Amino acid sequence: MMKKWVKDIFLPNAAKNSVLLLDSWPGFNDAKEMPEIKKKKIDILTIPPKTTGKIQPLDVGFNRYFKLILRTLEDKIRRMHPEFKLSQRSNIGRLLNQVIEQISAPRYNSLIQHAFIKPGYFDREYKKYETPDSYCFNFAKIGARCELKNCKELSFIRCSWCEKHICFHHFLMSLHCCRKNN
């Protein structure tokens, strides 16, 4: 599976002389020997064992925010929409899709940069950022209503892309998506 990812996803998108930062999982060792990696002169760096939480960019700065927005959504759903079964496969897919949609908004580019700056991969300043959880759920507008299609339902979330307040139905059931429009 790792070789397939390298061939089909990573290599077509990687420039010559790129760097690939990998976890110390032994399954990644095969990547170093792939002829395609050598041909493109990809430098593979391995994060030493037992240091992942300190220097792995996803663990240092991204996964925490991903998990936080996911948990906040789950908590709000349990409280406000208990009929939505969080354990159903299709609903898990909907929820993960929407978390990825929100966290990939351009407003969080600095958050992603910070994940590489904090462990020391780059020595530069980054812009201050508001976390996805804070932006999406801490809106000052008490009693905010959905801003889509003349909907009058209470706001469930504020979209990180279009900045509109969105109700549960439009956000999760209709899979509100702004990425294709930006």
Image (tube, rainbow, N blue to C red):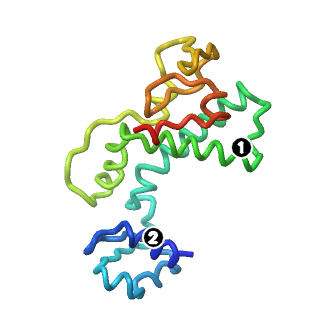
Q: Residue at x 36, y 40 (%)?
A: 106
Q: Nearer the viewer, mark 1 or mark 2?
A: 1
Give coordinates of residue 109: x percent, y percent: 34, 44
Mark pair 1, 2: CA separation: 30 Å
Q: Considering only order in the chain, which callout, 2 or 1, is on the residue closer to the N terminus? A: 2
Q: In which quarter of the image is the N terminus?
A: bottom right
In the image, is 25 to the left or to the right of 13?
A: right
Q: Position of residue 34 (x, y in %)?
A: 42, 86
**Residue of label 1:** 91
> What is the secondary structure assignment of the residue under circle 2?
loop
Q: Are marks 1 and 2 in contact (CB under 8 Å)?
A: no
Using the image as rendered, state which of residue 3 and residue 73 is in the foreground: 3
Please say if 110 is above or below 5. Answer: above
List the residue tagged with mark 2. Answer: 23
Q: Which residue is drawn at 45% across and 33% down?
A: 160
Which corner quadrant holds the C terminus? Answer: top left
Q: What residue type is labelled 2?
A: Asp
Amino acid tagged 1: Asn
